[in-house]
Amino acid sequence: PLDVLFLDGRGTVVRMIRSLPPGRLSPLVLRARVAVELPAGVLEETGTGPGDRVAFEPGLPGVDG
């Protein structure tokens, strides 16, 4: 399973799905410009929720600069 974050153009969480099962498709999120797949449980561990702003730092593993 995966946690999925849907972000708008400013990096604000507009929707999230916790523990999306393998082989399942997420719903279409029209306001989202980006979908980020994370290991299941990360959203709960980090307390991430709708309205939070997410940023990515170059140089981190798995992040293109």
Image: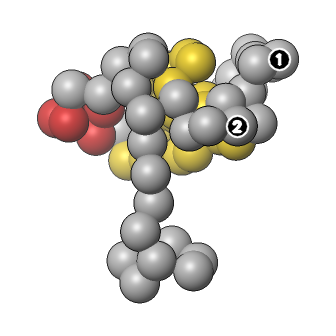
Q: Is residue 56 above or below residue 24?
A: below
> Which amino acid type corresponds to the residue marked 1 in the rendered image?
Leu
Q: Residues within 10 Å of mark 1 (few under 14, many from 20)?
A: few
The residue lying toward the viewer, choosing from 41 and 9, is 9
Using residue 8 as the reference point, say whether residue 55 is left or right of it. Answer: left
Instruction: Name the residue: 67% across, 30% down.
Output: 8
Quadrant position of the C terminus in the picture: bottom right
> Which amino acid type corresponds to the residue marked 2 in the rendered image?
Gly
Give SS at disc 2. loop
Residue 3: percent from left, percent from top? 44, 34
Q: Which residue is mark 1?
A: 30
Residue 43: percent from left, percent from top? 31, 32
Q: Is residue 42 above or below residue 60?
A: above
Using residue 39 as the reference point, say whether residue 27 is left or right of it. Answer: right
Residue 34 showing in the rendered view: yes
- Residue 22, by quadrant, is top right
Instruction: Name the residue: 46% across, 77% down.
Output: 58
Instruction: Name the residue: 73% across, 27% down.
Output: 32
- Residue 50, by quadrant, is top left
Q: Residues within 10 Å of mark 2 (few under 14, many from 20)?
A: few
Residue 14: percent from left, percent from top? 58, 18
Q: Is residue 22 above or below residue 49?
A: below
Instruction: Name the residue: 51% across, 25% down.
Output: 13
Q: Is residue 35 above or below residue 26?
A: below
Give the Cα separation between the discs numbered 2 and 1.
Answer: 12 Å
The residue lying toward the viewer, choosing from 24 and 44, is 44
Q: Which residue is mark 2?
A: 9
Q: Residue furthest left?
A: 45
Using residue 15 as the reference point, say whether residue 29 is left or right of it. Answer: right
